[in-house]
Every structure is written in structure tokens, then in C-alpha cells.
Amino acid sequence: MDLRQRLKNAIILAAGIGTRMVPINTELPKGMLEVNGERLIERIIKQLHEANIREIYVVVGFMHEMYDYLQDMYHVQLIYNPLYADRNNLYSLSMALNHLNNTYIIPSDVWLRKNPFLEKSTTSWYMITNAVDDNSFVRLNRQHELCLIPKSKAGNAMVGIAYLHFHDIERIRSQIFSLIENDKNKSAFWEKALCFRDRFFIPAKVVDVHDVMEVNTYEDLRELDHSSNQLKTDAISIISKVLQVAPEDIVDIKILKKGMTNRSFLFRCKRKRYIMRIPGEGTDKLINRKKEANVYYELADHDISDDVVYINPDSGYKISKFLNRAHACNPLDKDDVKKCMAFLRRFHKMDLKVNHYFDLFSEIDFYERLWKGVPSVHKDYLDVKTKVFSLRKFLSRQSIHLSLTHIDAVPDNFLIVNNGPREKIRLIDWEYAAMQDPHLDIAMFAIYSMYNKKQIDSLIDTYFVGECSEIMRVKIYCYISIAGLLWSNWCEYKRILGVEFNEYAEAQYEYAKKYYKLASNKIKNYQ
């Protein structure tokens, strides 16, 4: 028998953040979850060992250091994926292509009742269950083939486990190389490499739904092992205490769209829905939670912000009531923008006060210091920074009235609530709020919306109802340039932490350069 037919190895994919696993994913990676006192990844490794498979590679990324002990305990080899936050598991598998040869591909978040690796495999296969899953994109046909189906259809639950026979390896390698070269596939699952026309080119292996479980959510884990230690998270404990309920009363836990600063999840408790915010990577350095809490105390009873049930000024954990029938402002919808600018103008006229100030230039320097000597990705950064800072002289000559300013007044933070005949607007996420020129909020809205100059001028006219002086407009151009550099520096810090913002980051740097030039040319008229 050909040696290649006898030798088998395994690649375990364990790099992802597992965003659907909130709130557990803030504390440990999914492979480290315990079911019946046993970690998922250790159970997989033991099952592989039972099948005499000792050559095991684990692709790690998020909290990768937690997997280090596996090297000594089980003699596995770790492969680090530095782009785990910005790429899906297709990229993780691409990092282990040289090890493909009669290989089992296994996600780290599955629990297998029976050991599927003990069976002799002479051909490639992909594992599905006999359960129906709305999130699947394949369905088993009569020829035992896995056919691709439209998103609107339900298919067979996909487990993510496969055996790749050496006869198919070159084809799969070629597919993966081709896919990862296209940036459109950065969110693709590795199974895309198995697709050929309208089906997978390897057959299905069907197992009973009770023999395998993918642990994707907190409630998946609770269903599998209601006494698991990982169910006792800080977030769940806080919710239980604040709302005075048992952990079992906290249901329908769902990840919300990942924010740029935090991770938040939606949950239901006693027929009411809430949102819990958990601070994201590095936010302890970026946000002063005590100052944020003071802002919320100042906003109380003003019908401006979300309805906060709990906020911890030390950890930043926050629980707020969910706003039903609400949608975020669409920056391309003129009616939405008009409503939000009118709301913003009314808020600014309230002239609320807090005891802390947001210094734009100091914050730019602060984010730069967080890079800890890592050079900017922009070769002309020092020149651009010098030019942007030169705008401070013009601003110092302007008569600026300071009041509570949101600072992060981006479209996503304006919620338009359609609750009965009366429509209302709420402005959420006050983490950066402080005393500043309230007109800075206009600049922030514009640059997050990726507006061009025509759209920016229209936004300014909407806020001021057509009564904006030319010098006021130039001041806002200055803020656009300064804020562009501010958030560009913020993005560079997040990049160092492994979180990429790509198009947004590049756009902010371009705003810094373009609007410095525009503002400085106009400032000459006032000298």
C-alpha cells in the first residue's frame, strides 16, 4: 500500500473570535469551552489519538496563548494566524496547506459523542447531520452529493469536519490559493474550496444530529451541559444581579453587529429585551469609564440617550433597554439626516455641562503613544500631522462656546424610533462625550458617513438650516481634517491589536490630508 494512503494527520481550526458565543467569547476562545468537565479541543485531540493520529496541527489566533499548553501535554504543533480578526477560517486553513495529506479538518468548537476518526476512510468526505439548518448552504441529494442551495432555502446542518484524501489534495490546494487571492473571500468559510459549480466535489458523510453538536452560542453550551463552568461568566452574573433573575431566565442571547469599540449582545428576560455592552480589545486604554458614567448621569431624564439600567464606571459593562421598532440613521437618506441634524441641534442648545474636556490634539498624540514605537503605515505621517496641527492657530482665534458634545456622533449612533404615532430619536454610545465645540459632531457624522464635499456642505446647511457663515464652514472643515487624523491614529492602534478597519482607516487619513488643504487655502482669506 502507498505510504501516502496509510499516513493520516489532522488540522484543527481554532483561530476565530467566535462572536456568536457572547458573552463567553470575551473571556476565552471556543476551543477552551468545557463540556462535562472536558475542554472541547482536548476531547477532539484524545479522539484523534484513539485513532492513532498523532500528527496534529492547531491553527490559533484569538487568545492564542491559551492553547500553548497543548504543545507539551499532547505534542501538537501550533500555527499562528495573525489575521484571525479580519479573516474567516478559509485563511486559517491556507496557513496549513503544506500539511494536507490524508487530513482531517476539524473546527475546535464541536462536541462529538462518537469518535468518527476510528472508521477507515478511503475517500474524501464532508460531514453533515440529518438535521435541517436555515444557515446551511448545502443539501444532500439522492446520489449522496452535497448540492449548493439558495440562502432562502434550508439545508443539512454542516458540521465543518471533513476527511481529505490525498487524491483530492492538489485540487483543494489550488482552490484555496485561488480563493485567498481575492479579498472578497476574506469572510469565506473553508468549505468554499470544496465547491465546484453547483455542488461539493467530495461526497457527504451523514451522522445523527445527536452524535455531534457545534457549540456556537451560549445557549448551545447550556443545552449541552447546563453545569458547565463557562456558563458562569461575569456578564451573566451581572445581568442576574441587576435584574434580580436566575441565569436560566436570560434567553435569546444574540450577538449584535460588532461595534468598532465594543462587543454587545441582545437578550430577553421576563418578556423584556435588553442590550449588554462589553468593552472590546484595548478599550481600557481608550475610554475613561468614570467620565462616561458621569455623562450618562448628566443625560438622565433628558430623553436624549438610550435608557441605561446599569453602568459600571470601572469595567465599562452597561445594560440598557432595547429600543423596539428602531433603525439607525441612513446617511444617504435625506429625510433621516434632516431629522437627526434637527435632534443634534436641539441637544446642543441644551448646553449641558460635565467636568471633563476632549482635547483633539492631545488625543491624537495619545493614540500615537499607544503604538509604542511601531511606525505609522503612512510614509508621510509626520508631514501630515504637522500640517493638521497647524490648524490649531486658526481655531484658537475663533469664538467657541463649549458644551457637552457627543464626539462620536456617527449615523449608527442615531436611532430613529417609530413607536406609535410619535417618532422619537435617541443618540447612543456616549463613551467619548465631553466638553467641546458642539460643531465637532457635524464633522464626525460626515467623515464616518464617507461623505464627499458636496454631501458635507449639504450636511452643514441642514444642521444650520441654511444659515452657516463661511468662517463657520471653514472651522468645520478644520475639524474634519483633525478628526480624520484622530480616528486614523485610533485605527492604527486597533490594527496593532489585530483588529483591521481597512477602508474606514484609509478614508480617515485621506480626510486629514484633503481637508487640511481645503481649510488652509480658505484660512488665507481671514489673515
Image (cartoon, rainbow, N blue to C red):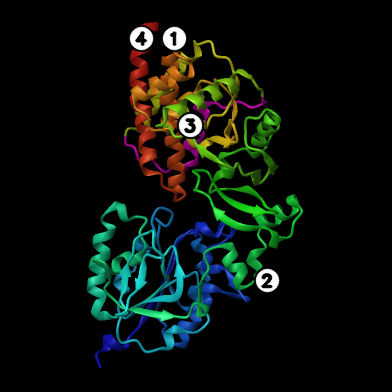
Q: CA distance from mark 3 to mark 1?
A: 28 Å
Question: Where is mark 2, residue-wise?
Answer: 227
User: Along the polypeptide, which appears first: circle 4 or circle 3?
Assistant: 3
Please state which of the two labelled residues, at mark 4 or mark 2, is closer to the viewer: 2
Query: Magenta part of the protein: which range?
Result: 354-379
User: Along the polypeptide, which appears first: circle 2 or circle 3?
Assistant: 2
Secondary structure under tag 3 reads helix
Q: Residue furthest bottom?
A: 1
For residue 469, the mark is 1
Residue 509: quarter of image: top left
Question: Where is mark 4, residue-wise?
Answer: 524
Q: CA distance from mark 2 to mark 1?
A: 65 Å
Q: Are marks 4 and 3 in contact (CB under 8 Å)?
A: no
Secondary structure under tag 4 reads helix
Amino acid type of disc 3?
Ile
Residue 375 belongs to magenta span:
yes
User: Along the polypeptide, which appears first: circle 4 or circle 2?
Assistant: 2
Q: CA distance from mark 4 to mark 2?
A: 70 Å
Q: State which quarter of the image contains the C terminus.
A: top left
Asked if residue 452 lies left or right of residue 391, the reply is left
> Which of the pair 386/16 is nearer the observer?
16
For residue 364, the mark is 3
Mark 4 neighbour density, 10 Å: few (under 14) some (14–19) many (20 or more): few
Q: Are marks 2 and 3 in contact (CB under 8 Å)?
A: no
Residue 378 belongs to magenta span:
yes
For residue 368, the mark is none
Q: CA distance from mark 4 to mark 3?
A: 25 Å
Where's residue 461, x and y in %?
A: 43, 17
370 vs 224: above or below: above
Q: CA distance from mark 4 to mark 1?
A: 16 Å
